[in-house]
Image (tube, coloured by chain):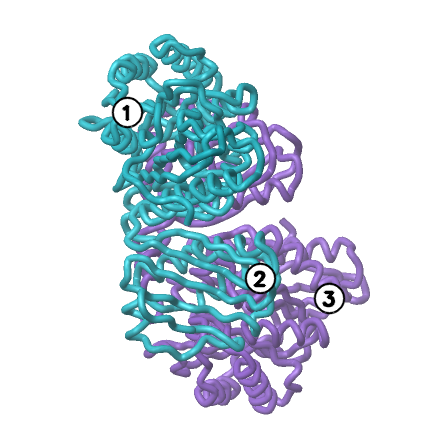
Chain colours: A cyan, B purple
Amino acid sequence: MRYKKVSGGITTPKGFRAACCAAGIKYRNRTDMAMIFSDVPCAAAGTFTTNKVKAAPVLWDMDVIYKHKTAQAVVVNAGIANAATGKTGLDICGKTADFAAQALGIPASSVLLGSTGVIGPNLPIDRITAGIADMAKNLSGTLEAGTAASRAIMTTDTVNKEFAVEFSLPDPEGSGTVTVRMGGMSKGSGMIHPNMCTMLGYITTDCLIDQALLQKAVSAAVADTFNMITVDGDTSTNDTLLALANGQAGNRPVTAEDESYQIFCEALFSICHDLAVKMAGDGEGATHLLEMRVYNADTRENARILAKSVVGSSLVKAMVFGKDANCGRILCALGYAGPDFDPAKIQVYLHGEKDTLCFYRDGCVQTFDEDLALAILSETAVRFSCNMNMGTAEATAWGCDLTYDYVKINGDYRT
Amino acid sequence: MRYKKVSGGITTPKGFRAACCAAGIKYRNRTDMAMIFSDVPCAAAGTFTTNKVKAAPVLWDMDVIYKHKTAQAVVVNAGIANAATGKTGLDICGKTADFAAQALGIPASSVLLGSTGVIGPNLPIDRITAGIADMAKNLSGTLEAGTAASRAIMTTDTVNKEFAVEFSLPDPEGSGTVTVRMGGMSKGSGMIHPNMCTMLGYITTDCLIDQALLQKAVSAAVADTFNMITVDGDTSTNDTLLALANGQAGNRPVTAEDESYQIFCEALFSICHDLAVKMAGDGEGATHLLEMRVYNADTRENARILAKSVVGSSLVKAMVFGKDANCGRILCALGYAGPDFDPAKIQVYLHGEKDTLCFYRDGCVQTFDEDLALAILSETAVRFSCNMNMGTAEATAWGCDLTYDYVKINGDYRT
């Protein structure tokens, strides 16, 4: 590891400040808006939902990222998704960005937006602008401000999600190194089956890096982290991951795919990985994190498809909730995933903290120690793996169990 | 309609008999094996799971159907799926067919097999053969015998599923008509997301029809019925639909795609449709049948994909359970299904017995009467539709709601 974990999240890197407020968009007695601000313009990259029905803030952000490639602020609200709101929704995005731009003294095209919550209703623009006015006056670079922002964007999340790392890169003269920092926060609990990236995730870094390389690094990290988690198979209308790099660390600019870029990618992967696994484990109603590693597969894409199929199976998820080692369901989920394989040649394992149990090989479900299986399935993180015996590719996917509370939360989400 | 519904199921057509018994495979105090027998050899057709992990009886049946194209008996058990059982599982199939062949006085290659239940364990061959010996002595052509067989193949099903129709076809001389009958039974409640056909379904007819035409008719009917239902997105290792035509009605042979074939197809569709909808409505833990019709789509395949995405969405299913008209979730499920469309041009409706409610159009979720929506969502069958405004293709998919009982049933299936 060429990076190390440090405290905080989005305000850990130099030159980033955050704020949040209780704007009363939907919730009472809690914060529900957050703002991220960089003291200087940033190279900006992003990945967005592949859902054909894209929320208005997603369309707004795609325009900013693809056309301008720079940004300086992000305004996020929880409670209402501003999705399926037609032209009115887009107008509200325009007004929100204009108001934030004026309050912060930057161009409206430098303001990124994010919304999460119920699909359909319009955002109350008066409360949004009042919230922005409040936040613009209270921006702070403390770690606490970043943590508070990560709480303000939660919906059915039960814990806030943030992570930060630091690493060393050469200074401009090449005579020494400087410390570069990177932090992130995300939210997501239901409608989680990202296909491009996940619900809402924000990454900040003070690294000086070329925008095209930043985008490339973000897309690569997302493919093996946020895109490998699933809570319920539903790809949201609002999925957005944004990364802002403001260059305040004073490193020699990262402009090629050299060693500095590799270190940057490792650090970025660690943040995306941490946030993604936290999101999977905090899936709506979840009592277990579910992990499936597929290795010795023929191709990486097939390994990804197979791993995701297992963590997405309702029957596997319900079995983990019930601590019932009905392991044939894992085999079934591998079988309908799509990629071709020979069922007689694979081995499937259940991994505990200390013990590993092989429950399928040579074409047969094995007789196994039911007490040991129950003990392993009682751990908070339940890990499965499958040796495909076909090649050298591998992938890991994360999900959570299916519980009564998932049904309860989603049978009555709007009230 | 050129057919009419009549009483019964698989024993309604001439020359078919059935039996069942309590073999004690897994359950106590209930029947768990069934046998279908035709007095004469039948043209036999079938469709099977596309899961790469195919249960032993599926492999056995594929061999019989593809190689021999004829059959005279079917032996089915509930409780154990005989899947992921390797060579032992195949050996048990061979022994089961040999034993049944001897008991019935037919070749082993005329015996079709079916199993449903837990994946992994081996079938207790002694109980299977004892059951066959019992059933071979008690075959009966009564409607009651067919109904009893449809009960014996149930697992977590709460109701047995059978349906029968009759129709007229020309007699061999062409001077008059004869009555042709067709009946079917099926089971399926969990691990239901057929991709080729569904859990276990059996159709009998006394029609005299060419085997290739029978197979063609079955494949076409399955595509718009069994393949359009989903309970939990999990495609089973055991899905099998078999059709047996014994020619006892005395009709002029159906050997071309003429009017007789069309009538046959309509009757077959009605049986597959009835059984498939019953299976969707009896999904594990279900309290509502869920129907989604997509019309004016660009292609039939896209209409199918869109319709299935909606009835398969965990969030739509949980919303129907909770009678919460959070209709943006339907839009979301259409959006991530895959086919391209313009969200601004579609309309989405909720249909009650008497009322219809448009809850999305012109790119926006509409304001609607919440009391009316609650009343419609309280009906047993909840129907949605979407006008794509792109072409003339349409498809309908069926599913069920996601309930606490689904989680309960599948958190502890083996005990």
Q: Chain of mark 3?
A: B
Q: Is residue B336 above or below residue A312?
A: above
- Quadrant of the frame with the C terminus of chain B: bottom left
Q: Which residue is mark 3?
A: B209
Q: Badge 3: how crowded within 10 Å, few (<14), some, or many (20+)?
A: many
- Total labels: the figure holds 3
Q: Which label sits on residue A141?
A: 1
Q: Residue at x 34, y 37 (%)?
A: A187
* Picture coordinates of residue A251, whole percent (x, y): 45, 30
Q: Secondary structure at mark 3?
A: loop
* Picture coordinates of residue A199, whole percent (x, y): 41, 36
Q: Residue at x 37, y 8 (%)?
A: A102
Q: Is residue A209 above or below residue B157?
A: above
Sequence order check: which comes first, mark 2 or mark 1? 1
Given the image, on which type of amino acid does mark 3 rest? Ile
Q: CA distance from mark 2 to mark 1?
A: 45 Å
Q: Is residue B248 visible?
A: no
The answer to whether marks 3 and 1 mark residues whose Cβ atoms lie closer than 8 Å is: no
* Picture coordinates of residue B284, whole percent (x, y): 38, 58
Q: Nearer the viewer, mark 3 or mark 1?
A: 1
Q: Residue at x 46, y 62 (%)?
A: B188
Q: CA distance from mark 2 to mark 3?
A: 51 Å
Q: Which residue is mark 2?
A: A392
> Would residue B12 be found to the left or right of residue B65 on screen?
left
